[in-house]
Image: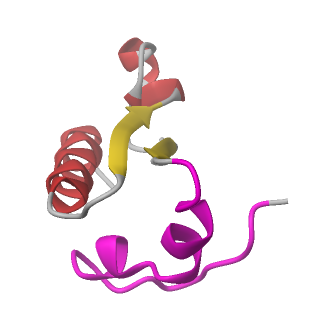
Amino acid sequence: MEANSLLKRLDEIGHSLEQINHTLALIGIGSVGLELERLDAYSDLDFFVIVEPGYKHSFLKDLHWLSALCPVAYCFPNT
């Protein structure tokens, strides 16, 4: 995926999360965070979603905030 497309996707995820109660922040990390100089065609999209206490499980269980933008091809629990 092109570097600008990754940043656009991150913005889209942010806009999706803005529509949901209990969301506090979206933090891009790595090459889509503070290290934008590393961003290239081989970069992936790493981020954290910060939610209000008690809502983490519901955001992990229901990925509609992400799949509404683009189908999720593969999902696994963060260990």
Residue plotted at (33% across, 55% down): 1
As drawn, 28 above or below 21: above
- Give yes or no for residue 54 being in the magenta stretch: yes
Task: Tell me which colouring the rendered structure shows.
Answer: secondary structure
Residue projecting furthest to the right: 79
Q: State which region is magenta.
A: 53-78
User: How far from the left and from the top, in percent, is residue 36?
Assistant: 37, 18
As drawn, 33 above or below 14: above
Q: Is residue 23 left or right of residue 14?
A: right
User: How far from the left and from the top, in percent, is residue 71?
Assistant: 35, 86
Viewer-closest of 64 and 7: 64
Can you tell which quarter of the image residue 34 is in? top left
User: How far from the left and from the top, in percent, is residue 49?
Assistant: 46, 47
Viewer-closest of 55 and 69: 55
Q: Is residue 47 left or right of residue 6?
A: right
As drawn, 38 above or below 79: above
